[in-house]
Amino acid sequence: MSTRRLTTAQALVAFLARQFTERDGRRHRLVAATWGIFGHGNVAGIGQALVEHATAPPPGTPPGPPVMPFLQGRNEQAMVHAAVGHARQSNRLSAHAVTTSIGPGATNLVTGAALATVNRLPVLLLPGDTFATRPADPVLQQLEVPWAGDVSVNDTLRPVSAYFDRITRPEALVPAALAAMRVLSDPAATGAVTLALPQDVQAEAYDWPEEFFAERVWRVRRPRPDTAELDAAVRAVRAARRPLVVAGGGVHHSAAEAALDAFAAATGIPVASTQAGKGSLRYDHPADVGGIGHTGTSTANRLARTADLVLGVGTRYTDFTTASSTLFAHPGVRFVNLNITGFDAHKMAALPLVADAREGLEQLAEALTGHTVPAPYAAEYARLRAGWDARVTAAYTPADENARPTQAQVLGVLDTLVTADDILINAAGSLPGDLHRLWRTRSRDQYHVEYGYSCMGYEIPAAIGTALAAPGRPVWALVGDGTYLMNPTEIVTAVQEHVPIKVVVLQNHGYASIGGLSEAVGAERYGTAYRYRAADTTYTGDPLPVDLAANAASLGMRVLRAHTVRDLREALADARAATVPTCVYVETETADTVSGAPASEAWWDVPVAETATRTSAVKAREEYDRHVAARRRHL
Ligand SMILES: Cc1ncc(C[n+]2csc(CCOP(=O)(O)OP(=O)(O)O)c2C)c(N)n1
Ligand SMILES: [Mg+2]
């Protein structure tokens, strides 16, 4: 058997550079690039291995190792966000790896890993780890656990990983690397995959079987429905008078948008979408009734309240979608869940339809040929749709071009500028709600709101990863001021890599979303505004003299300041055309106020103090108890 003598790190990089996915006849690099910040724990191992794979040999010379592109980041969490952006934009068919030093570099991955796993998006994490041989414990940055000698800080990555392994012997890399690729490319199991790499093992040489380095193709499966499950689902849809589709992120992951369009057009069943599923249909598709749940449209929510059959497609049914178990109120409502994971397919005590979304929708459409919803139902939702659209227009339209825009008007201006090409990224604050309610999505991948983990600081790095996977398309990171302050530093990476992302900073001097929530739950906006500490020790003084536009400029961005709606039109148009990373900074209409978007009319359960001395909390609890009474367990 022929072997190749390499270090564990060299073998891992050589292996990764030869892995591919294949779906629908197209191949992709499974691990297309590696992000990294070096320290002890990866500089000599993975770092040295990456340099060997940095460049392709010149044409005409014997073929060398395939290239593993390297991307330098500023912060480990942010590198995972960038990798996640790339994976989502690549329909999960291509991932990035992230290499870190031991200790803090490694634990900085935890939030990014959780986000990836919650959203079921593939990313390969390669944290350095303390010595497997333990010649001089404790090394710099090692956690000593008196009661357990085999624990390291990397164990914090276990619960947030879809697969975790620690490579304590070189030869253990072989099964671990294969398992890692299996999970990354498995549409039902994917998420953050962690291979913790003790620093001594990384640098240790071993004679690897040559076959380990053969090109390998991981076919991303599209399982078809079971016939009995399909029959049951079809019967349920045929029996329904008021069916509603809830489209989740699985529609996008499966590239099932065209199949959903055909299904909805043929049956007339209206389609509401979750945050991850928005854009499954274009906003102007006659069956699109917009976002569902707490951040949704009143159209979708009225249909949800009266639906007798809910066909979930690729959705996890989070509390935002179900209005914390209060939304689906029809006494006889049944659920059919088309999902690639049995875990999700069985939620809501549904009839499960375990299959790939595209395959499942195509087979449902075929089995339902000729079936349509009753005409009055179609007329009813067409009317509701038109009503909502008029409310969007009203929220978008400024009364005065020379005034400061509301947040909704910022989206309105952007709405006039974008084409199907543009991609919008957001994750936290009051923007996800406004976007879900208002945004008119023009293409399948335009709406990129990470709301599984809703992680402040995802937007800017994710925009870089997304732009790398969608070259030439305008990619917008929309961030509140709080979100900007959480994680602006990957701007440097965008500048370094010449990725012309567009960052829109919406300044409202604090956590407006949480301020509103705080008020609703009787916490009186306590600690949610960015203001000076006042004499009474709470933050009720003047707004802080912080200049985020100057901050973005200091990191190397071109910055445009917009003071009015008119300025904003010019600035956003300019940013859209820009070929360098550009920031548009805009102060939105008054701190702590609502954004200007109409209400969704659906609840979200945030428990309120059961006993309190202050009237605000006592009143909030009375209101809370009224909502709780509407909770329902679907059995
Ligand atoms: C990492 C992280 N920490 C805390 C939160 C909780 N949280 C959600 S929104 C928000 C405030 C966001 O402020 P900003 O970006 O200014 O948006 P605004 O609410 O003002 O629209 C906070 C603290 C979160 N989602 N993510
Ligand atoms: Mg804010």
Image (tube, helix red, strand yellow):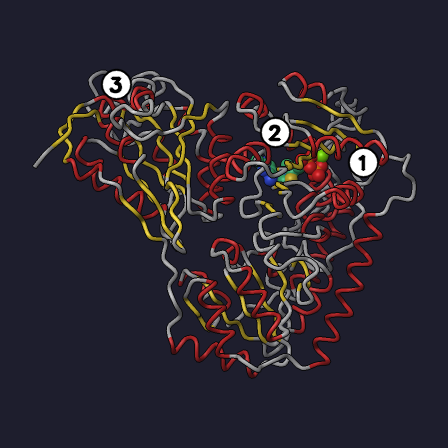
Which mark sits nearer the N-terminus, 3 or 1? 3
Residue occupying image coordinates x 70% and y 75%:
378
Mark 3 secondary-structure assignment: loop
For this view, does 607 lie left or right of residue 596? left
Mark number displayed over residue 591: none
Q: Which residue is disc 3 drawn over? A: 137
Between marks 3 and 1 in the image, the one whose residue lies nearer the viewer: 1
Mark 2 secondary-structure assignment: loop
Q: Nearer the viewer, residue 479 or 281?
A: 281
Residue occupying image coordinates x 87% and y 44%:
398
Q: Residue furthest left?
A: 1
Q: Is residue 527 visible?
A: no
Q: Amino acid at mark 1?
A: Arg
Q: Amino acid at mark 2?
A: Pro
How far is mark 3 from mark 1, CA to CA?
Answer: 60 Å
Q: Which residue is disc 1 drawn over? A: 569
Q: Is residue 139 visible?
A: yes
Which mark sits nearer the N-terminus, 2 or 3? 3
Q: Position of residue 615 (x, y in %)?
A: 78, 47
Q: Which residue is disc 2 drawn over? A: 500
